[in-house]
Amino acid sequence: MSNRAETLKRIMDESRRHYAAYVLFNQALADHLQIHSTDLQCVALLDQEPGPVSTGDIARLTGLTPGSATRLVDRLEKAGLVERHSDPADRRRALVALAPSARERISEVWDLPGRAFIEVLERYGDAELAVIADYLHRAAEVGRAQAERLTGGS
């Protein structure tokens, strides 16, 4: 096996270990916050959005059906993690945003793990960090596309 083939195999093997470890971490974090792991992922995705989003947007972001996305938002609202606001452009539609206390609550729990992840990243130079960021972005796009393919979305 060539050096490149060995490296690619190692990356694939380590990626699978990383995904499995991250799923376990995500579940532990969700359990700690006493919410569903899907709910935690929705909170993380909402935190990345520049502003409030519709329930339909949440369905698109999470891969859930519109009905499931509505139930997810209901759970998050009951848990005090999101707030619904009327859409100023269409009063029949609600927009969902993280509750101010949600960021604080998540930040407190994320502080120690976040520092541990930063410690790992600090071992790399700027050029290596750019490659890591590019890989993660591209791998996420592939993951979304493959999830859509597997669920019959395309």
Image (cartoon, rainbow, N blue to C red):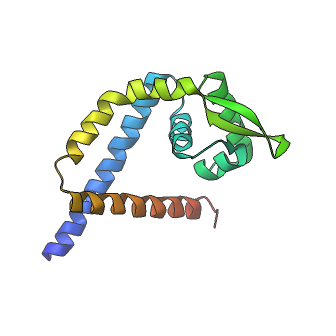
Q: Which is more toward the observer, 88 or 145?
A: 88
* Quarter holding residue 46: top right
- Position of the C terminus by quadrant: bottom right
From this view, report whether residue 5 is shown above or below residue 23.
Answer: below
Q: Is residue 128 left or right of residue 151?
A: left
The residue shown at (26%, 41%) is: 118
Between 12 and 138, the residue placed more toward the observer is 138
Q: Quadrant of the N terminus?
A: bottom left
Residue drawn at 51 percent across, 45 percent down: 48
Which of the 4 image quadrants contains residue 38?
top right
Can you name the residue that lies furthest to the front here?
88
Q: Residue at x 21, y 44 (%)?
A: 120
**Whole-percent x, y for residue 125 in the image:** 18, 56
- The image position of residue 150, as x and y in percent, is 56, 61
Vertical comparison of 79 with 94: above or below: above
- The foreground one among 110 and 66 is 110
Instruction: Report the number of discs.
Output: 0
Residues 75 and 114: in front is 114
Q: Residue at x 31, y 49 (%)?
A: 18
- Residue 114: x %, y % from top left: 32, 35
Is 139 displayed left or right of 59 in the figure? left
Q: Which residue, as the protein is rendered here, is positioned at the far right?
A: 92
The percent position of residue 35, horizontal first and vertical second, equals 53, 27
